[in-house]
Image: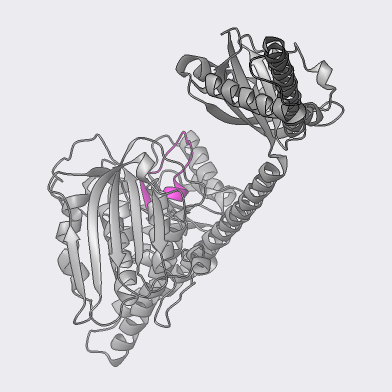
Amino acid sequence: MPDDNIRSALRRRAEAVALDNAPQAPEDLQPQRALHELRVHQIELEMQNEELRRAHEELEASRAKYVDLYDMAPVGYLTLGEPGLILEANLTAARLLGVLRSALVKQPLSRFILPDDQDIHYLHRRRLFETGAPQTWELRLLRKDSGPFWARVQAAMAQDAGGAAIWRVAISDIDDRKRAEMEKEKAKLEIQNQRLVKAESLSLMAGAIAHRFNNYLMAVTGNLELAMGDLSLEARSFQDLTHAMGAARQAAQLSTQMLAYLGQAPGRHEPLDLSSLCRRSLPALRAPMPRGMTLEANSPAPALVVNANASQFRQVLANLVTNAWESCQAGGAVQLAVKAVSAAEIPAAHRFPIGWQPHGDAYACVEVVDNGCGIAEKDIERLFDPFFSRKSSGRGLGLPVVLGIVKAHGGVIAAESEPGRGSAFRVYLSLSAETLHPRPKLQIVSRSTGGGAVLLVEDEKMIRRVVLTMLTRLGFKVLQAEDGVEALEVFSQHQEDIRCVLCDLTMPRMNGWETLSALRERAPGIPVILASGYDEAQAMSGDHTELPQAFLGKPYRLRALREALKQALQGV
């Protein structure tokens, strides 16, 4: 046994010392042998005492070293009983909490936790007791005569000498790191807020410009159409006017794109199968692609139904696919895929509009991926700004229009890219529980609209003059008013003659809604058509007690005016 070996070795050493220090004696002398044994035993005891003294000194040195390491550790250490009372604490813990060590003993740890963070502490404490697994959490602790500070708490279960359950806690001061993270997050939120303010200001400006732009275009296209109506198809000037009308229509499309960017694109949303729409759109998407470019599609056979406008979503597909192949070199490839995803799968980074949050669990994802040149990180945040383009051939409104349409559908678009490795754009729309219905066939009812008087209410003189001529050509007598106040006066004088009112929405003194309500008070059921340079969705938004029979978005053509009048006068 090891102890026997130690005792034997000690005995041999003691005998050696005794022999060295004692005179030689005859071995047969009994007293001399007994004296020798006593000396050996005495020396052996002295050696044992020396060993014990040295071991004690080493133990004391080790204990002092442990105490120094324990007390001066950069981490606060606590030992707690099961009820949560502090049994032991090192000096670092006392220093972190700003109290004497003696003031910690027999105090509950919860006393030093910020009230708002108590739930965090109790949640992890319960998990510690229930599972026995070590727990780590972050919370704010109270420091005496100072403000709270952020700390990381690490806890593990243990047993004391008597077998009672205790838990040991290590507390680290992470206040600097946490505050740095909070400052970083604050800066990020400030940048996001600046972008939101910028987007809102841009929306207001673009909406106002589009409204004024459409008013002017109304005068341009209206006069062009009237002039063309007075010419024969063979007239030399007819071709020139046709070109001018084409340019005016392109300008009107630009205005429509601006409204689409604002999320104000007109159009009705209805149940739509995205998978089917993408498959049907492939020929039109492939047609403009350069030779050598490929478009591969993967859309599931099961329907992915969303509530959307088919025409607008075809525009989304066209712009995304065009943007993809324009970024590729010869021989590039574009992939179009449609799939169902959960809200948790929607990336949090680089998603637009800023601040969007999911509302629901199931989404349809339309993904357009290319192997082109990619996009630098600094440019991703600007991709959806109007007229920003990284390409010399870029038009600058493709992606902003996509964002506007997606925003109008309550969806989100996420961008992912890396220079030299291509890009991916993913559009997410909430899946709809509605059932697809076959679209009814359009029935065109041809009926005369001419005859009687129309009250034209328009504050812009040049538009008033154009619409007056249009209405006259449709066979109506026209009464005019520059605003709602004057319209009520004219209506009072000619109420019996007026079959319909064509009223602008944005006017001084009394706007279109106020004029509509005032007219209906005097003549309930009077047919009214509202017209505006704003899109229908924006113009018709809000709660209104009285609604018009029809809406005309400026600039409108003679045919659109005729159809609006038919709609308004049906049943009159």
Residue 167 percent across, percent down from the top left: 60, 18
Q: Is residue 20 left or right of residue 476?
A: right
Q: Nearer the viewer, residue 529 or 74?
A: 74
Residue found farthest to the right: 145
Asked if residue 274 shows in the view, the reply is yes
Image quarter in which the C terminus is found: top left
Residue 153 lies, with reference to residue 550, above or below; the image says above
Main secondary structure of the magenta stretch = loop
Coordinates of residue 524 in the picture (x, y in percent): 42, 34
Q: How many marks?
A: 0
Q: Position of residue 479 (x, y in %)?
A: 46, 56
Q: Is residue 364 left or right of residue 219?
A: left
> Is residue 478 or residue 146 the one in the foreground?
146
Residue 106 vs residue 191, the one in the foreground: 106
> Where's residue 168, x and y in %?
62, 22
Q: Is residue 554 visible?
A: no
Q: Which residues are magenta?
A: 537-551
In the displayed structure image, the side of residue 135 where residue 246 appears, left or right? left
* Residue displayed at 52% across by 39% down: 518
The answer to if 44 sits in the magenta stretch is: no
Check residue 543 for magenta coloring.
Answer: yes
Q: In the image, 279: left or right of 519?
A: left
In the depicted structure, whether residue 360 falls above or below residue 287: above
